[in-house]
Amino acid sequence: MRPDGITPSEPDEFGLVQVWWGDGKGKTTASLGMAMRAAGHGYRVHVLQFMKGGTSTVEDVRGEYAAMAEIPGLSYENSGHYGWHGFHDGSSDDEHAARAKGGLARAREIVDASREVDGPLPLDGPPADGVHMLVLDEVLYAANRGLVDPADVVALVEEKPDDLELVLTGGHEEPEFVTGRADLVTEVRKHRHPIDDGQGARKGTEF
């Protein structure tokens, strides 16, 4: 059955904190799939990516950016520095930390604005006017690597409005600083990955 289209709507049961972590592939993929699903119901969703700013082996413009730009109610922005921190990267820790801290400040701005949300939101409205779901992709990786203070991530969780769905992803190490405060915690485990055999990131699957 073909849907009639997407019209602005308001979620009835949003407000949980989700944590997706682990050494397996699929954390970002899962969160983006959920973001797409929420947007399909007419909810306002924003994806804010940390860490991912392109490298010499991965294009700056990822496939998900083009796809999200075509979905009403779903927006994204990137606060990552060029190069993955510590890999394929000649930039300094200070540069990465500055971008990551800027991303966290942006997240706080959107969380604060979401306190005023009551009802449907314009699908083309700016995220600074508030959202129903906020995905902070790789924020846990940034915290584990010391680019942002884990305490600041915890504060964001504790201060969020009751009806904002907050999704945190990233990191191979368990983010114990926040798992106890989350409603949903998923560990994505690796059993086998082609990167271990020298396979690089592939266009269409990893970016």
Image: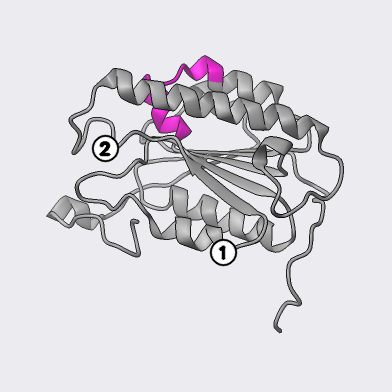
**Residue 51 included in the magenta stretch of the image:** no
Seen at 82% across and 51% down, the residue is 10
Question: Tag 2: residue type?
Answer: Gly
Q: Determine which of the numbered discs, if any, sits on residue 103 in the image.
A: none
Residue 117: percent from left, percent from top: 81, 38
**Residue 59 higher or lower than 172, as above or below:** below
**In this picture, residue 59 sits left or right of residue 28:** left
Residue 122: percent from left, percent from top: 77, 52
Q: In which quarter of the image is the N terminus?
A: bottom right
Residue furthest right as drawn: 118
**Residue bearing the label numbered 2:** 83
**Residue 66 higher or lower than 87, as above or below:** below
Prevailing secondary structure class for the magenta stretch in the rendered image: helix
Q: Determine which of the numbered discs, if any, sits on residue 70 in the image.
A: 1
Seen at 39% across and 21% down, the residue is 98
Disc 2 secondary structure class:
loop
Disc 1 secondary structure class:
loop
Q: Please tell me which of labels 1 and 2 falls first in the chain.
A: 1
The quadrant in which residue 78 appears is top left
Select label 1 or label 2 by which is in front: 1
**Residue 124 higher or lower than 103, as above or below:** below
The span from disc 1 to disc 2 (Cα, nearest Å) is 26 Å
Q: Which of 39 and 189 is in front in this view?
A: 39
* Callout 2 crowding tier (Cα within 10 Å): few <14, some 14–19, many ≥20: many
